[in-house]
Image: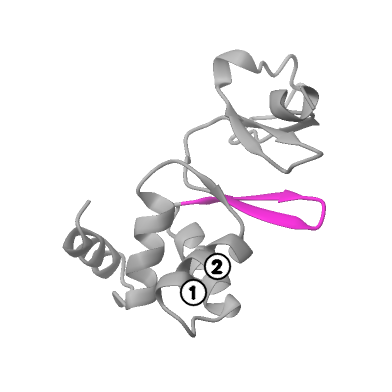
Amino acid sequence: MQRRDWQKRLQQAGLRATPQRVLAAELVLARARHITPQQLHAELAARLPGVSLNTAYQILQQFEALGWVRRLALGARTWFDSNTTPHDHLVCTRCGRMEDLPPEQAQLSSVPQGWRITRVMRIAEGLCPRCLSR
């Protein structure tokens, strides 16, 4: 998407197309990725000096409210995932790398009777191939 397209998408969602929001949309929404507010802040600040960490948090919360990202909490760390299709996650406990686990590779074996599941989000922790080879 071009910068103008992001501006239009933000405006259609009822948000002002500030330089910070437009750049955040380009960084977070242009491809499927997992990002922490701290990572987004660093990427924004590299191109827009003076951007605060609070701004990064607020933008991600706004994107979450619009359904553009999903929040993942892992211990004290919060990630935002721009892939909003149903899927699970693999997280390396050594390096922090996070990857998507497609639904066909993760099965929900049983659901208690009377429940209607509307969203499943699981996080499997372990060591990634790179950390295992070290």
Tell me the tag on residue 45.
Answer: 1
Horizontal and vertical percent for residue 18? Answer: 32, 78
Amino acid under label 2?
Ala
| Residue at figure coordinates x 58%, y 61% from the top left | 39
Identify the residue at the far bottom of this view. 50
Horizontal and vertical percent for residue 81? Answer: 54, 46
In the image, the segment drawn in magenta is 69-80
> Does residue 72 appear to the left or right of 7 in the view shown?
right
Snapshot quadrant of residue 13: bottom left
Q: Is residue 30 placed above or below 92 in the rendered structure?
A: below
| Residue at figure coordinates x 67%, y 15% from the top left | 107
Amino acid under label 1?
Ala
Q: Quadrant of the C terminus?
A: top right
| Residue at figure coordinates x 41%, y 64% from the top left | 24
Tell me the tag on residue 113.
Answer: none
Residue located beneath label 2 in the image: 42
10 Å crowding of disc 2: few (<14), some (14-19), many (20+): some
Q: Is residue 122 placed above or below 37 in the rendered structure?
A: above
Horizontal and vertical percent for residue 109? Answer: 73, 14
> Does residue 114 appear to the left or right of 57 in the view shown?
right
As helix, strand or loop, the secondary structure at mark 1 comes to: helix
